[in-house]
Image (spheres, rainbow, N blue to C red):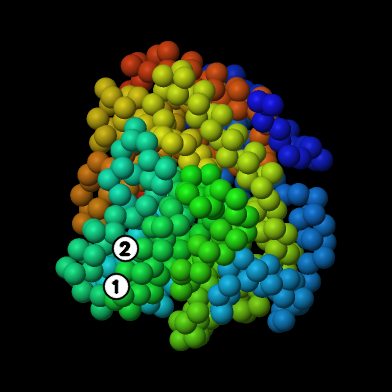
């Protein structure tokens, strides 16, 4: 059958609000043309992020009732720890309220002035946390990963020649860890192959450097390995996940993505000294080591979500429904990053709005247009997000993309059909869209709160 069957039926519903185009025009103007400033109630289809926006299952809600809020040694902690270790077999599991808290604790514990942390591509919060401690994040994704139109099964792979060259240039003593983001969110949600994970791990260990995974979308990455890498077509996703993890010395995690929770995360590692440092930091900012930044009920929701995240039926639906959106936009002549990522479709705004130069933010122009036209909220991943250097100068980002992130189990196919219709309408008058200038921006992560003026 060709119909994509959602492997669930709806048990509880949330209303969404229909507004007129004029109402949306005034809402986005009031938001200073930054979609992060729009009240969520004024958004019809919210594709801003797949983070924390998934629908929990009845089993997760039931687990929430089972949550035990004891300060120390809660049984919910044991349930959480066992579920995490079942997939991610590290010696130390340190729960945090979300991924960036794990990053903050990790980098404050291991990095500092003059250090360099390579990755395929660091996510924005990861890069910001690295720069916050005076270190430098270096992105070494393969060339294919920088070109939206090039087809490659694992565009999230790291260029290992460039990694060796970097280690040679800055010295292994200045590289506390090497990371891989699976899947590579900022590069289009592209997976990393098992072979590349293995090779990066080998290089790291050759120089005595620890190897960490930013594993937010581990299940989607594993599914792509099963689909695309020889030798894995019959392997259970759980086994693929365990194999990916076997190459790493630690991980950071946002439980708001593949683990299907609304909040949560963790830092995991095998190194006793690092774990001790991290736990000391944890107590300062997050909480006691058996709950970190989370309530007992959250720990239990994550434990159940982790089991659901690796279901083959679920992953089959998840990846096929994402490519359904990609295929439709592609057929309509809208340039999209290919092959399609797992959690999102990325429109190549630089190609789509080629009349708007990168420093006038074509991605921002497209994100605003999608909201004005149909109440769809996507997110610029381009020069607004990455264009500001630590030195305070502005340069075009590698790509100017608009990400339509798909919350897990939240929208139906008819919602996505509507998104496709709106995007086609925007495409009809693409040449009429104007660029933007920034009128106000904070020092870090400017895309969240920057204000814009239409040119
Ligand atoms: N790493 C990656 C690859 C991410 O995509 C994110 C979050 C984080 C780390 C940080 O996790 O939000 O729990 O603190 N990405 C979200 C997104 C925000 O929209 O892509 P967090």
Residue 17 rendering spot, x and y as whole percentages: 67, 28
Vertical arrangement, residue 237 with respect to residue 341, above or below: below
Depth order, front residue of 43/13: 13
**Could you say whether the residue bearing mark 2 is in a helix, strand or loop?**
strand
Disc assigned to residue 118: 2
Residue 68 rendering spot, x and y as whole percentages: 79, 71
At x 70%, y 53%, the residue is 308
The outermost residue toward the top is 428
Vertical arrangement, residue 225 with respect to residue 407, above or below: below
Residue 103 in sight from this viewpoint: no
Vertical arrangement, residue 203 with respect to residue 160, above or below: below
At x 60%, y 23%, the residue is 417
Residue 334 rendering spot, x and y as whole percentages: 41, 23
| Badge 1 vs badge 2, beta-carbon distance below 8 Å | yes
Depth order, front residue of 2/49: 2
List the residue tagged with mark 1. Answer: 175
């Amino acid at each position: 059958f060709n119909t994509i069957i959602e492997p669930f039926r709806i048990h509880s519903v949330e209303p969404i609000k229909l507004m007129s185009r004029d109402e949306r025009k005034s809402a986005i103007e009031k938001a200073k043309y930054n979609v992060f400033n729009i009240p969520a109630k004024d958004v019809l289809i919210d594709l801003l992020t797949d983070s924390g926006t998934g629908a929990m299952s009845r089993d997760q809600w039931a687990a929430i009732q089972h949550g035990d809020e004891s300060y120390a040694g809660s049984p919910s902690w044991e349930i959480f720890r066992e579920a995490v270790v079942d997939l991610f077999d590290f010696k130390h599991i340190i729960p945090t309220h979300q991924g960036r808290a794990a990053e903050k604790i990790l980098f404050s514990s291991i990095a500092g002035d003059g250090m360099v942390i390579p990755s395929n591509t660091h996510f924005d919060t990861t890069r910001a946390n690295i720069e916050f401690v005076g270190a430098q994040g270096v992105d070494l994704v393969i060339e294919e990963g920088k070109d939206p139109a090039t087809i490659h099964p694992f565009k999230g792979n790291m260029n290992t020649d460039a990694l060796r060259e970097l280690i040679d240039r800055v010295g292994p003593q200045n590289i506390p860890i090497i990371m891989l983001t699976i899947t590579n969110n900022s590069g289009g949600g592209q997976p990393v192959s098992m072979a590349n994970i293995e090779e990066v791990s080998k290089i790291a260990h050759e120089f005595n450097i620890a190897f960490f995974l930013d594993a937010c979308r581990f299940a989607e990455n594993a599914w792509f390995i099963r689909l695309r890498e020889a030798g894995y077509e019959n392997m259970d996703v759980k086994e693929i996940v365990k194999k990916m993890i076997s190459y790493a010395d630690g991980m950071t995690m946002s439980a708001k993505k593949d683990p299907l929770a609304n909040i949560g995360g963790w830092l995991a590692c095998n190194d006793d000294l690092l774990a001790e440092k991290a736990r000391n930091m944890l107590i300062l900012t997050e909480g006691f080591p058996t709950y970190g930044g989370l309530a007992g009920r959250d720990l239990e929701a994550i434990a159940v979500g982790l089991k659901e995240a690796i279901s083959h039926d679920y992953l089959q639906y998840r990846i096929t429904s994402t490519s359904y959106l990609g295929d439709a936009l592609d057929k309509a002549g809208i340039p999209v990053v290919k092959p399609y990522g797992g959690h999102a479709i990325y429109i190549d705004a630089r190609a789509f709005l080629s009349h708007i130069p990168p420093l006038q933010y074509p991605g921002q122009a497209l994100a605003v247009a999608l909201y004005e036209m149909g109440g769809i909220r996507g997110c610029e991943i381009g020069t607004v997000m990455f264009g500001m250097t630590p030195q305070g100068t502005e340069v075009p980002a590698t790509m100017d993309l608009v990400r339509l992130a798909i919350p897990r189990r939240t929208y139906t196919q008819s919602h996505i059909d509507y998104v496709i219709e709106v995007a086609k309408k925007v495409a009809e008058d693409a040449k009429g869209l104007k660029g933007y200038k920034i009128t106000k921006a904070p020092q870090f992560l400017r895309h969240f709160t920057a204000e814009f003026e239409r040119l």
